[in-house]
């Protein structure tokens, strides 16, 4: 078997695929998704476009499943890149599942991949603008979210159900944790001269987003992109433009950072037409 650099990719969706197409040529790409049919469909599209992709079932809320993904990747060579675009949205899941997948799962994935990432490797995890919308939690809680051992994360007071208002609040907490976890993990990945960053997209047009536009929160989302400075939603390829910089030699001095790419929606939420009292 030919030994290749390996890209681990979780979450077989449009954003992950756009990134994989930018950085995955000449590499072995292992795509994992909880729904194996999604992973197989994406792998077929990529393989028919000239990439080398294999699909595997992977649930990032399970450490065992993450370790199986890593084991699959190591069959083909050294793991040089991570794309984490797995997750569930506030309208898809209850509070407990959002915390288990988006918060705990991401933390475990970054931890385990950090143990095996190639010298000089790079990773990206997809967070969300939602992490930038909630009130500041304070230095103590931020440090807890960043550094608490993964198996103790869900025991933190701030993450107890009685302290979480609804699924949106849970999602915001998860994404805030993602940002802090990336900062912490970058100090560990850096021992191998490897880099890890996060991207926080706003409204990006994907099949899931289209469902949201047509759902009960549709008017909220449409108002958001109509009143943001860009005046429109974004595309997966625009997120991939940024990811390509972060994951290649153009971004060698960038690690432990989060990048907001939302057409100015968050700026407008705090200082413009999207400010709550203006709506």
Image: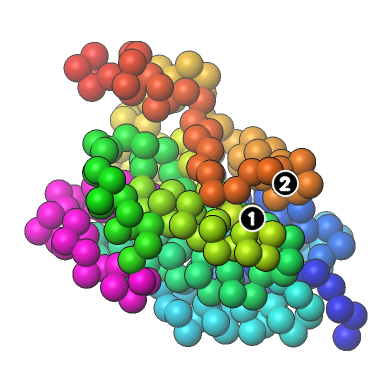
Q: Is residue 13 visible?
A: no
- State the residue at coordinates (26%, 38%): 136
Residue 161 magenta-drawn? yes
**Residue 195 tag number:** 1
Q: CA distance from mark 2 to mark 1?
A: 8 Å
Q: Quadrant of residue 213?
A: top left
For residue 63, above or below residue 20: below
- State the residue at coordinates (43%, 20%): 228
Residue, disc 2 = 252
Specify the farthest residue to the left.
162
User: Circle 1 — which element?
Assistant: strand
Q: Nearer the viewer, residue 8 or 137?
A: 137
x then y, percent, for residue 59: 47, 74
x then y, percent, for residue 277: 19, 17
- State the residue at coordinates (53%, 38%): 259
The magenta stretch is: 149-175
Callouts 2 and 1 close, C-beta under 8 Å: yes
Q: Is residue 136 left or right of residue 182?
A: left
For residue 24, above or below residue 275: below
Task: Name which of mark 2 and mark 1 comes first in the sequence.
Answer: 1
For residue 154, above or below residue 221: below
């Amino acid at each position: 078997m030919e030994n290749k650099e390996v890209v681990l990719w979780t979450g077989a969706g449009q954003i992950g695929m756009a990134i994989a197409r930018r950085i995955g040529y000449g590499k072995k790409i292992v795509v994992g998704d909880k729904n194996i049919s999604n992973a197989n469909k994406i792998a077929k599209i990529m393989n028919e476009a000239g990439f080398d992709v294999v699909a595997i079932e992977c649930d990032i809320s399970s450490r065992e499943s993450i370790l199986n993904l890593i084991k699959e990747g190591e069959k083909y060579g050294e793991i040089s890149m991570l794309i984490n675009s797995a997750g569930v949205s506030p309208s898809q899941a209850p509070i407990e599942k959002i915390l288990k997948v988006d918060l705990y799962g991401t933390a475990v994935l970054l931890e385990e991949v950090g143990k095996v990432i190639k010298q000089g490797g790079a990773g990206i995890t997809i967070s969300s603008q939602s992490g930038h919308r909630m009130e500041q939690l304070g230095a103590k809680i931020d440090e807890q979210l960043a550094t608490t051992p993964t198996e103790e994360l869900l025991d933190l007071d701030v993450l107890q159900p009685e302290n979480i208002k609804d699924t949106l609040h849970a999602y915001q907490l998860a994404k805030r944790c993602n940002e802090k976890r990336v900062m912490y993990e970058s100090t560990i990945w850096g021992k191998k001269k490897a880099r890890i960053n996060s991207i926080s997209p706003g409204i990006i047009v994907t099949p899931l987003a289209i469902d949201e536009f047509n759902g009960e929160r549709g008017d909220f989302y449409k108002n958001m992109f109509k009143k943001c400075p860009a005046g429109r939603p974004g595309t997966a390829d625009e997120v991939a433009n940024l990811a390509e910089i972060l994951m290649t030699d153009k971004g060698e001095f960038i690690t432990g950072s989060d990048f907001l790419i939302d057409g100015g929606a968050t700026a407008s939420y705090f200082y413009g037409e999207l400010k709550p009292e203006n709506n």
